[in-house]
Each structure stands twice: as structure tokens, then as C-alpha cells.
Amino acid sequence: MKQHLLTTFIVWISLLLLTTCKSVPPATNSYGLYEIECAGAGSQGSQLVKVWVYGNSNNVNIDLIKRYAVHGVIFKGYASGNGCTPQKPMATNPALEQQRANFFEPFFNTDKAYNKYATQVGNIESVRVGGEYKTGATISVAKDMLRRDLEAAGVLRGLSNGF
């Protein structure tokens, strides 16, 4: 009898915990929800990345995907896959985007300077996932030129500094 009561109690507690748990939505930043992954080997000084943007429509502007590609190379990095080694983000300080908002706000929005470093390589693809669309394209990001320009602007420290 005691074992039956104990089993019933455990089942009720388990059900209670399962019904009160809620899934946490994916984190977004000021640039929206996106994923970045390696798309293969790029040419010398560049990275080939696949960027997926989530939204209510599958009509996504390629400039938005390019912006996320450059943002991802600077602030997110990506895991290994497709014959690539994992790439850490260029910015080692997670708060750099907020600290240097006077640089990054025009870079990603008004000036659209990110376009200088991103080139569309593949076609735009769209997949319906649940109630939203996942739209992506393969982008080549001129990583070496981007790093050099960010160092020249004083946004990133040079690789030779600090040793």
C-alpha cells in the first residue's frame, strides 16, 4: 500500500512539473532572430556562411541576410560543420556592440557599410517551420578586410596587440 501511494505521489509530482514547464523562445537581439553556419571553404581571406533568418514572411531582402552574415561573423561565430573548423566571433567582448553603438548603429543601419564585406553566393531558400518561415542564403564575408577595417577604426584590437 505504501509503495502504491509513493508511486502515485511521484506520478502526480511529475505531471505537475511537466505541465508547469514552458518552453523558452529563442533569444533575439536588436537585429532579430537568425542562425549562422559554415557553408564550406571560402576563398583566401573570406568565410562562406549560410545565414537563416526567421520571420512571418518568406519575402526577406538579401540586404538583411548580408547584414546578419557580417553581424554573425563579428559577434556570434559558428560551430564546425560542412568541412569547416569552428570560428569564434571577432569580438571577444560580448558587450562591444553596446559599448561601441556609435560605430555599429550606422555601420549596420544608416550607412549600410556591412554591404562592403558581404556578397551573395547562393540562391535564397525558404522553409516553413511551424507558423513562421526560415529564409536563408549563402554569403561570402570578406573576413580579413572586415577585421582590418574594424582594427583601423579602433573597434577591435589588433591580433598582434596584447602579446
Image (cartoon, rainbow, N blue to C red):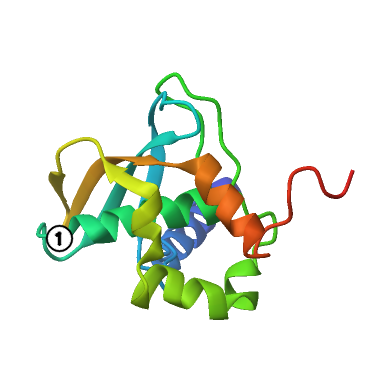
Question: Which structural element holds mark 1?
Answer: loop
Q: Position of residue 58 (x, y in %)?
A: 11, 57
| Residue 3 vertical placement versus 13 (above, below) | above
The answer to whether one can see residue 147 in this image is yes
Query: Within 10 Å of the Cα at label 1, are there few (<14), some (14-19), or many (20+) other Cα atoms?
Result: few
The answer to whether one can see residue 1 in this image is no
The C terminus is located in which quarter? top right
Q: Nearer the viewer, residue 131 or 43?
A: 43
Residue at position x 52%, y 58% in the image: 9
Residue at position x 62%, y 64% in the image: 153
| Residue 9 vertical placement versus 109 (above, below) | above
* Type of the residue with mark 1: Gly
Q: Position of residue 152 (x, y in %)?
A: 64, 59
Q: Describe residue 154's horizontal placement relative to residue 107 as left or right.
A: right
Q: Nearer the viewer, residue 144 or 20?
A: 144
| Residue furthest bottom as drawn | 102
Q: Nearer the viewer, residue 35 or 131?
A: 35
Q: Position of residue 88 (x, y in %)?
A: 60, 42
Which residue in the structure is indicated by mark 1? 131
Residue at position x 15%, y 44% in the image: 124
| Residue furthest right as drawn | 163
Residue at position x 43%, y 53% in the image: 70
| Residue furthest top as drawn | 83
Q: Position of residue 112 (x, y in %)?
A: 35, 67
Marker count (numbered): 1
Res 19 quadrant in image:
bottom left
